[in-house]
Amino acid sequence: MLISMSAAQPARRRDAAVTREAILAAAVIEFTENGYAGAGVRQITERAGVSAMMINRYFGSKQGLFAEVVDRSFGPPTVVGAERSGLPRAIAQALAENTAPDTERLDPFLLTLRSASDPEAADIVRRGIETHVGARLAGLIGGSEAELRAQLGLALTAGTWLMRTVIGTHALAGVDNERLTELLAAMLEPIAQEADAGPAPVRDASAG
Amino acid sequence: MLISMSAAQPARRRDAAVTREAILAAAVIEFTENGYAGAGVRQITERAGVSAMMINRYFGSKQGLFAEVVDRSFGPPTVVGAERSGLPRAIAQALAENTAPDTERLDPFLLTLRSASDPEAADIVRRGIETHVGARLAGLIGGSEAELRAQLGLALTAGTWLMRTVIGTHALAGVDNERLTELLAAMLEPIAQEADAGPAPVRDASAG
DNA sequence: GTCTATACCGAGATAGAC
DNA sequence: GTCTATCTCGGTATAGAC
């Protein structure tokens, strides 16, 4: 019944692409929830419904799989983009909502935090951040020091994720989202403003 | 030859207090550099010059040892304290200096970042932060929402440690310390200021 | 009472048989 | 393409040497 497949089996069973995709999807969940070290190969493959060795077969190693997971996680825009004037508040609001205590969002920053322990994982994450989120946010900010300012914004973002959801300090976990948004927006304001140069044209204003 | 030791061995050998302290000192180094999961009991005890079982004997478990390490790391003041007006700049400067690329400081925030992966370790760290750094910084800030503001400051602190030293993004690693101090101070300004209440008396103004 | 040696269990990675 | 040892490594428990 499970074995006897006649001619046309639509998908599943012996389809490399499907197996690969199933592993990748399962790995995103496991790595984000448990971090690079905490996620077990057996847990990932069990969730994907395949044997443990498939990871080595399709991704070379646990590390190779992690690299693809990072690319997939940071690929789509995380920080909502707006014109530069409203940027701090837009980021602050999204951050406050996504880090709310009951929310169970699968976020690349969670992946980052829980995987930063391992140097090998950290290096993979750095490449992912600089390529995707960092470049997008820098593009939204524009002007001189765009990358530096963007990375300071990401530092506050990651730190908020850390303190509010991973560590779970009481004051941050219990605060009202409106109030938190105000405070975060105020902290982000300085890095969204031009230092000395004139207002550079903002490119790629739709996504970030 | 290796075994025959005569009478008077000064200290060391069979001194519980000395052994305990040696393990603790070694554990601070290993946990800070490699995180909770990354540090092995064998590495720690080898550095301390004792057998691996001594951790179980003196601290119950690896987790118990970690709890004492967290307390010791967060115990002494990390954030330099000043009067409230100069607080943002003081914190920013210390942060910029301590996260400079070549600096090899043993910092509690590094310990936090590299250990946050494990839920058990995260819980221990939360207690340590709230008890020590969080309470001290909240005391320096004073007024309403002191704890919330303090924890947002710690979020930026931890995030800067993360992005600059653990992940190691290029823009943050290469920036001039003076410039970084300015930007960080500007970001910290909003959380050091009173929201609506009058100026509350600042207690414990010497250390933070 | 202080410490070491040895063994057990679980997890990741590899090799080779089917 | 899958399964089954097997190797290594890490945290822990027990026994016993000094």
Image (cartoon, coloured by chain):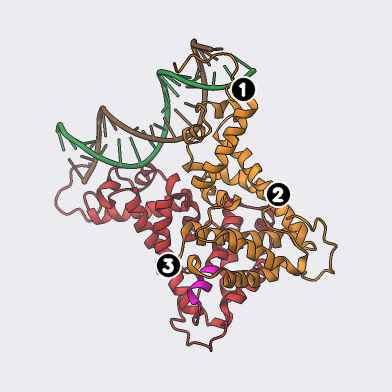
Chain colours: A red, B orange, C green, D brown
Question: Would you say residue B136 is visible in this rendering?
Answer: yes
Q: Nearer the viewer, residue B94 or A90?
A: B94
Q: Which residue is mark 3?
A: A130
Q: Nearer the viewer, residue B20 or A182?
A: B20
Q: Main secondary structure of the magenta part?
A: helix
Q: Position of residue A184 (x, y in %)?
A: 63, 69
Q: Which residues are magenta?
A: A145-153
Q: Residue furthest bottom?
A: A198
Q: How many marks?
A: 3
Q: Is residue A149 magenta?
A: yes
Q: Which mark is residue B10?
A: 1
Element type at mark 3: helix
- Give above or below for B207 relative to A135: above
Q: Which residue is mark 2?
A: B132
Q: Which is closer to the viewer, label 2 or label 1?
A: 1
Residue under the point 54% across and 49% down: B116
Separation of residues labelled 2 and 1 (CA atoms): 37 Å
Q: Are marks 2 and 1 on the same chain?
A: yes
Q: Position of residue A20 (x, y in %)?
A: 28, 54
Q: Is residue B171 left or right of residue A163?
A: left
Amino acid type of the residue that numbered disc 3 sits on in the rendered structure? Glu
